[in-house]
Amino acid sequence: MRHKKRRLQLNRVTSWHKATLNSLVRNLLIYESMRTTLHRAKAVRPLAEKLISLAKANTLSAKREAFSILGDHKLVSSLFNEVGPRFAKRVSGFTRIVNLGKRRGDDASIVIFELTELKPKVKKIKKAKEIKEKDTEEVIDTAASAQANEKKQVEAREEAVKEKPPVTKKPAKKFLGGIRGIFKKERDSL
C-alpha cells in the first residue's frame, strides 16, 4: 500500500522525475534564483532545504551525500564553503517562492524560486587618482575625437547618398486580390 507516499510527480516516470529535481536544485545553487513553475518549485523545495542543512553540518558524510545528489565536486565545494555559512543562523526557511502570475501559453503559475540569503553584491570603488587621470585624458581626447567624428559622419552621409540605388516599390495587392490569383486558373480544354 502507498500510505504517506505522496509526492509531486510532475507527470514523469521515476528516473526522469529524479533527474528533473536534481537539475533544478543544481541550477538553484549555481544561480541562486530561477524562474520556474509553481509545482516544480514546490517539488524541489524539500531537496534544496535538505542540501543546505547538509551544508550547515559540514561533515564528510554530508559532503558525500550532497555529491550523490549534485554530481559535481565544484558545486559541492561552493555549497559547503559559500552557501552553507550564509545560513548558519537560520534553522529553516532557506528558500522562498515569489509568485509572478500565469504563463500565457498554458496558464501555468510562474514563480521565482530563490534562496533567502543571496550573495552580497560587491561594488567597486574607484580611487581618486584613477578618476582624475581619466578625466584629464577624456578632456583632451574629446576635443580631437569630436572633430574627427564630425568629418567621418559627413563623409558617411555623402557616400550613403551616392550609393543608394533607386527604390522601386511594387503596388500593394489587396488581400483578396492575392487569393483570387490562386484560384483563378485557365480552364483546360476538353
Image (cartoon, rainbow, N blue to C red):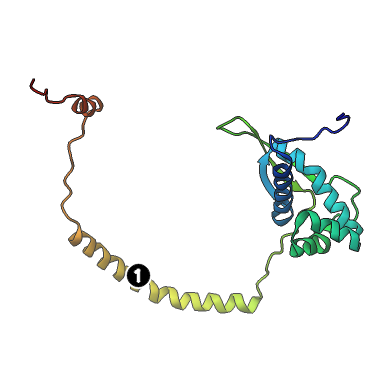
Q: Position of residue 134 (x, y in %)?
A: 55, 76
Query: Toward the viewer: 189 or 41?
Result: 189
Side of 56 where 105 appears, left or right: left
86 sits left or right of 19 in the view: right
Whole-percent x, y for residue 99 in the image? 70, 36
- Residue 95 in the image, given as x and y percentages of width and height: 79, 46
Eyeballing the image, is 158 above or below 170? below
Can the viewer see residue 58 in this picture?
no
Q: Is residue 86 above or below residue 11?
A: below
Indicate whether 94 appears above or below 160: above
Q: Amino acid at mark 1?
A: Asn
Q: Which residue is mark 1?
A: 149
Residue at screen point 18% across, 61% down: 162
**Quarter of the image that includes the N terminus:** top right
- Number of numbered discs overlaid on the protein picture: 1
Instruction: Count neighbours of disc 1 (C-alpha within 10 A) and say few if under 14, some if 14 to 19, many if 20 or more.
Output: few
The percent coordinates of residue 137 (x first, y second) are: 50, 78
At horizontal 21% and vertical 28% (from top left) the residue drawn is 182
Residue 172 versus residue 158: which sits nearer the camera? 172
